[in-house]
Amino acid sequence: MSGAWRTARPEKIELSSAAADAVAQALSSTSTRECCGFLVGNQSGATIIVCSVIEARNAYEFPLAFGISPEEHQRCRLCCPPGEHIVGLYHTHLAHSWPSALDIRNMGLYPYVWLVLNHRDKSRTAWRCYVLQGESLREVQINLPNLPALVPKPIPAGINPTEVQP
């Protein structure tokens, strides 16, 4: 994918059981700093289909932010199975599941779908996914195995993601 949508802007993301389990495992493996990785698969129309994940090394030592170096990004791209590519990324926040101001800025640099997870609420029903469309942040429906579709929800009243610190 390398930064451009192959067909339509994503309306929903579907994670395989293996991909969802790998993301959940990454979420439960750390609680003191953000973890991150790439979602690997394909796009079919307006649906992102995630078959697997590749965990990435967080380049930041600071616990409230994540960064992926260009070298790590390239390493992960080379790890994609034949016929699949990076279609998104995931990362955690220690207290919420919406993008920070830094995330929104970085969405312009890495225009994938962004799956945001919350360390306080590790349940899969708390997962949220976003895409930057022009200058507008839009939440994307998530389909996970054995759960009803996680439809977009409003960000809590009084929270402006562009003002939230990482």
Image (spheres, helix red, strand yellow):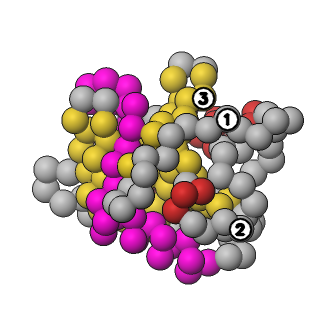
Real-space Cα separation, disc 2 to disc 1, in angstroms: 19 Å
Q: Amino acid at mark 2?
A: Arg
Vertical placement of residue 36 versus 107, above or below:
below
Real-space Cα separation, disc 2 to disc 3, in angstroms: 23 Å
Q: Residues within 10 Å of mark 3 (few under 14, many from 20)?
A: some
Report which residue position mark 3 lands on.
Answer: 137
Q: Amino acid at mark 1?
A: Pro
- The residue positioned 66% from the left and 44% from the top of the image is 99
Q: Residue furthest left?
A: 82
Vertical placement of residue 33 versus 75, above or below:
below
- The residue positioned 49% from the left and 47% from the top of the image is 150
Report which residue position mark 1 lands on.
Answer: 154
Asked if residue 114 lies left or right of residue 3, the reply is right
The answer, for residue 69, to whether it is visible in the render is no
Of discs 1 and 3, which sits in the foreground? 1
Q: Residue furthest top?
A: 134
Report the span colored magenta: 1-30
Asked if residue 32 lies left or right of residue 164, the reply is left
C-beta proximity under 8 Å, tags 1 and 3: no
Vertical placement of residue 108 versus 144, above or below:
above
- Point out residue 21 in the picture as x, y percentages from the top left corner: 39, 71
N-term mark: 2 or 1:
2
Q: Amino acid at mark 3?
A: Leu
**Which label number is shown at residue 120?**
2
